[in-house]
């Protein structure tokens, strides 16, 4: 078996062959090191754990054709590679790579609104803040990230996409042209099938929003849970309301930040009545544009330049279970609170969301279809500064996740699903879609990528067969 040194020499030499071949085609778009641009590009990853990786080079294409031609050279050289969109994957090597060839799609940043304003084509180098501002100017909107700095391609999949496949072919994928691949791309991770060069998303008329952040102190947590339960019932009849609850500890005190967004410019919608009666420490609720709400989220939750990790789980919605899970989180993180910043983040997967794909005949591979009841999606996060704490942070998150899952299991409310965008690299996201969906994904990959280029050379992200990327 090859030693680690031999392996890394092989990666470096193959990446050098790929780099030279691509530089011969596009000399000004291959960024070599050491250089200022190389360092700046490395720092554009959200998580320091990713930004510490040193690829052989960054390649920044300006057209789909260039992605295609470069991928052919990378595959010919058998060079390991990674694909970076907005660079917000929370995982080590999620979209970065040590010594390999790094696609950085930052310059594929087109925003093309259709003449009838019913759809938009977006480049994979865009971040949501830029997209929302442009759409708002045209009085249209699309579902997107709640944080302005998150990238478009790692976050969402729309009605169609242009994608470069392993054999270098550039295809447009939608429900008519490639129905199976289209379904696989809805949840299966584009990085398992190709490199997306453009996404087409549906647009909706836009007239402004209402929302912001409500910050509530620990003494009102019982009221917060009671109000959340009322809100959850009201959500069944209100498809415009949205809220994330983010429980945090600062200087020994606990708070919950409720990030609220209502997709209509209506002040204090009744769905939030119970929530709005609770006294707040701070409150920014107002009529505002989506772009302003997304900017606010970026500022409030900013942890760039720090070490970050995510861990996720889902369970059936039950307010008492949720309350117990939050209490367990508080108890287990308390002894480490001086060293790490932890958060317990709660989202609904509403009944409407879980059965939407089945109702509208647009498949996805989440495996969430079921009774018209909401699920609770929990995101556990840790932020810290020192590399020597990496293993401790991961161990705490892992044991927290396991303990909360056990709690859900006791009540018979566990759920296999793990949301890819919130998952840790040690979690088997694809297994969480269920056996049938996993088999479907493997089948699609075998058809569109028979040599397994996106499973074996493209090292980042969640693979169809899980493997640990931690080393
Ligand atoms: C501060 C912050 C806030 C967040 N808020 C939310 C939220 O509100 N809701 C939510 O759902 N998620 C949220 N996330 C998670 C976020 O959606 C994911 O991290 C997402 O994958 C980021 O997309 P990106 O393009 O920036 O990431 P990247 O790190 O660039 O990519 C993520 C994955 O997609 C692959 N990829 C990227 N571009 C392409 C492409 N063109 N073709 C093929 N594969 C590609 C990468 O290889 C990688 O595996 C948040 C993350 C952060 C850090």
Image (cartoon, rainbow, N blue to C red):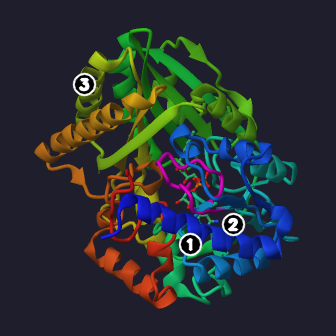
Assess whether mark 1 and mark 3 are in contact (beta carbons under 8 angstroms): no
- In this rendering, would 349 be left or right of 392? right
**Residue placed at 56% from the left, 72% from the top?**
79
Camera-side mark, 3 or 2: 3
Q: Main secondary structure of the magenta part?
A: loop
Q: Secondary structure at mark 1?
A: loop
- In this rendering, would 346 be left or right of 403? right
> In x, y percent, where is residue 262?
62, 40
**Residue placed at 21% from the left, 44% from the top?**
405
Is residue 431 on the magenta stretch? no
Q: Secondary structure at mark 2?
A: strand
Which residues are the magenta region?
84-102
Spatial distance from mark 3 to mark 2, Cα to Cα? 43 Å
Camera-side residue: 297 or 393?
Answer: 393
Query: Which residue is most to the left?
Result: 410
Is residue 17 placed above or below 31 in the rendered structure? below
> In x, y percent, where is residue 244?
49, 37
**Residue placed at 68% from the left, 35% from the top?**
293
Q: Earlier in the sequence, mark 3 or mark 1?
A: 1
Camera-side residue: 468 or 328?
Answer: 468
Residue holding disc 1: 79
Residue holding disc 2: 202
């Amino acid at each position: 078996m090859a030693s680690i040194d031999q392996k890394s020499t092989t990666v470096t030499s193959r990446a050098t062959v790929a780099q030279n071949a691509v530089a011969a085609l596009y000399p000004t778009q291959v960024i070599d090191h050491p250089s200022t641009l190389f360092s700046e590009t490395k720092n554009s990853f959200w998580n320091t754990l990713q930004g510490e990786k040193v690829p052989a080079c960054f390649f920044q294409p300006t057209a789909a054709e260039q992605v295609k031609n470069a991928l052919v050279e990378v595959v010919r050289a058998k060079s390991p590679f990674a694909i970076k969109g907005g660079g917000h994957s929370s995982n080590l090597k999620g979209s970065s790579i040590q010594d390999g060839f790094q696609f950085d799609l930052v310059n594929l940043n087109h925003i093309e609104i259709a003449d009838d304003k019913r759809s938009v084509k977006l480049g994979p180098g865009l971040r949501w803040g830029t997209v929302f501002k442009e759409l708002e100017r045209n009085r249209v909107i699309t579902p997107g990230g709640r944080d302005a700095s998150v990238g478009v391609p790692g976050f969402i999949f729309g009605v169609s996409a242009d994608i470069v496949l392993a054999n270098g072919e550039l295809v447009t994928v939608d429900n008519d042209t490639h129905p199976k691949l289209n379904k696989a791309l809805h949840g299966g991770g584009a990085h398992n099938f190709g490199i997306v060069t453009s996404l087409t998303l549906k647009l909706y008329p836009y007239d402004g929003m209402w929302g912001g952040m409500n910050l509530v102190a620990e003494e009102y947590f019982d009221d917060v849970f009671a109000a959340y339960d009322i809100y959850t019932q009201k959500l069944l009849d209100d498809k415009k309301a949205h809220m994330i609850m983010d429980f945090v500890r600062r200087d020994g005190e606990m708070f919950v930040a409720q990030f609220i967004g209502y997709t209509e410019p209506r002040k204090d919608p009744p769905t939030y009545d119970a929530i709005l009666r609770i006294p707040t420490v701070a409150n920014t609720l107002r009529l505002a544009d989506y772009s302003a709400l997304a900017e606010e989220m970026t500022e409030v939750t900013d942890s760039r330049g720090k070490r970050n990790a995510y861990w996720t789980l889902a369970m059936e919605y039950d307010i008492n279970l949720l309350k117990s899970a939050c209490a367990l989180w508080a108890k287990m993180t308390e002894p480490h609170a001086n060293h790490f910043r932890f958060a317990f983040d709660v989202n609904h997967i509403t009944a409407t969301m879980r059965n939407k794909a089945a109702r509208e005949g647009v498949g996805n591979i989440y495996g969430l279809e079921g009774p018209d009841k909401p699920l609770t999606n929990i995101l556990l996060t840790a932020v810290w500064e020192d590399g020597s704490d990496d293993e401790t942070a991961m161990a705490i998150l892992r044991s927290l996740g396991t303990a909360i899952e056990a709690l859900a299991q006791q009540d018979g409310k566990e759920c296999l699903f793990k949301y890819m965008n919130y998952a840790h690299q040690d979690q088997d996201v694809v297994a969480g879609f269920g056996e049938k969906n996993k088999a479907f994904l493997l089948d699609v990959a075998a058809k569109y990528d028979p040599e397994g280029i996106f499973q074996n050379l493209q090292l980042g992200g969640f693979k169809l067969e899980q493997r640990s990327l931690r080393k």
